[in-house]
Amino acid sequence: MLKWLRKYSRSWFIALIIGAIAIVFILWGVGGLKSPRLQEVANVNGAPILMTAYLRQYNELVKEYQDRAKGELTEENLKAMRLKEQAVNRLIEETLLLQGGEGLGIRVSDAELQELIRNYPFFQEGGRFSERRYQQVLARNRLSPADFETMERQRLLLQKIVQAVASFAKVSDAELQEFYRMAKETVEVRYLVVTPDRYLAAQRPTDAEIDKYYQEHKETFRTPERAKVKYLLFRAQDFLEKAKPTPAEVADYIKDHGEEFTRPLVIQVRQLLLNVPPKATAAERRRIETRAQELLRRIKMGEDFASLAQQFSQDEASKNKGGDLGAVKRGQYPPEWDKAAFSLKRGETGQARTSQGIHLLLLEDIKEYDRLPESEARTLATKRLQAEKSRRLAQDAANQARGELNSASMAEVSKKYGIPEKETPLITLVEPIPDLGAQPGFNRAAMALKPKEISKVVDLPPGFAVLQGVEHQDAQVPPLEKCKDQVRQRLSKQMAQKQAEQEAAKLLERLRKGDPLSQVAAQAGLPLQDSGPFTRFQGFLNQPRAESLTSAAFQLSAKDIYPPHPLGYQDKYYLLAFKGRKAPGPEEFKKEGEQLKTEFLDHKRSMILSAWLAEARQKAKIKVYELP
């Protein structure tokens, strides 16, 4: 069991366990598998994973990591994270789950799907499902009921399959104690890092070595399919002036969409409060923030909010009632609290920060609604109408311009409409477009064009584009003459990598023979560093993915100070030296036992699910093709 824990505890499915699947997996696309530009990226037991599904998953991953890093990710960071491989693996695991669910006879009935959709607050009016509201919301998001219901059926099916697979998890006292020891035990090491960079400049591969490397690794230099296009973009914002609605149109819109111009006035809400002392240190604030995020995670994974509020809330007035605040009227609490609580939908959780601390909130019901003030409703309706109308005008102009491109040049049409003609560089299927960013629909349209061919009007978030092909290059392996510098760089890096590995092995051999660590470090010109204490789940240097380093560190002891070989991670070689270990005491276990039991059950469910996936993957026939 503990071997499984070490191996699978960091699976991405931890985030999806039991009722917490938040991502709707949309397998969408255009055309058939025989299309040369819409090929499969993988095949699982005969079921294809299409390029379009891969692109959607890849873009979602990029956005997910960018949001976590607050937009500070570089291109190098993204490459190091191997997001392409992550995207394909997620789709493979989804496919395995769906195939496994079919084998288990798990289905989603029409009644279950209807019940799910009817309970969505955004499809309701006055607390009841509204067919008119349903159609309006889907139309506004450019979804047909059939497409939306297919997506929701698959999302619910995946959730049921995950629940079924993970439902066998049980926790014994012995397992709990061993898990606690593993979770809380810390180790501390000193270490040296040998990097290939210090040897890179000295590499001088010969022409013969370069040619040999190229012949042996030709496919790694294959260039993806590329296209260059000219285009006109009819931005919706450019039509805002022409799209101003009349007072009568605004009044009619408010009348037809009356339920959208209300706001909650009285709500039924529960609260879990974590006080933050006014003079709290930065470390104390981080600790409270971490506790809040952990509690929020547990709530979203299905734990009872009331029970957690009784255990952890520091709001004495509501703690014994499971955090129930009763009926709360707008303006009763601070503005920050109101903003968070009154923006929630029924059953949703959120958090607010006030001078008192961090408030975790659960909206149980909306008791009364209040109409928006007339001026606010008019302003909101005007913006919505203007946005909708400006998009229609932009689309009409784009369609008209496309028709004129059959008999006029793009430059002439550009001049007539006052829309600048732009040209892309050679782009691949996944590259962002200069001035537009990531636009998968634009890329797909560009790849499908031959030189001088005109595309259909492409619907993009900023507006509507018409493309004309300029150049198209098929995927190909370039001759050595065209990629010699690239081959040289890769070979040099490989040679430097090998030299760094050999140097690390020599240094470790000296250490294992008894040479002092500080002396070896000084003679090699390497800084001697200290990891500080860390747990298995924190990971070496707070890198949860550095599993080989973390595992090796916990195998060291005062008797076995050094590992048997250098440890490679992210193209570097680490030499670890044991410094100390600390195990948790029994009194700590008694104090945290109940909370730990819930956490361990979550981990065990994740272990079972990951083990099931690993076995399914081993038995499956999986092909992964070249990724763009």
Image (tube, rainbow, N blue to C red):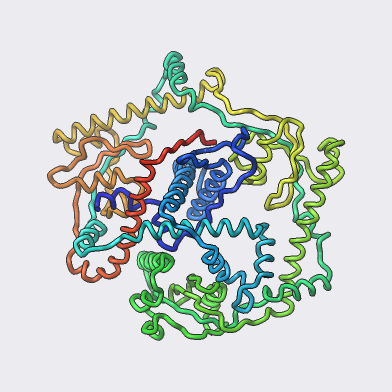
Q: Residue at x 53, y 22 (%)?
A: 483
State whether residue 103 is above or below residue 145: above
Q: How many marks?
A: 0
Residue 282 point in image, percent of width and height? 38, 65
Percent of width and height locating residue 474: 62, 28
Residue most extreme to the top:
208
Across and down, in percent, residue 397 comes to 82, 50
Seen from the viewer's position, the closer of residues 570 and 131 is 131
Left or right, 496 with reference to 4:
right
Q: Nearer the viewer, residue 3 or 198?
A: 3
Examine the rendering and report whether any part of residue 282 can be seen.
no
Q: Is residue 61 above or below residue 509?
A: below
Q: Is residue 378 above or below residue 297?
A: below
The quadrant the C terminus occupies is top right
The residue located at (80%, 45%) in the rendering is 419
From the viewer's perspective, is residue 154 above or below residue 48?
Answer: below
Note whether residue 514 is visible.
yes
Residue at point 31% right, 58% down? Answer: 604
The image position of residue 552, as x and y in percent, is 24, 44
Q: Is residue 538 left or right of residue 71?
A: left
Q: Residue at x 34, y 58 (%)?
A: 605
Q: Nearer the viewer, residue 422 or 348?
A: 348
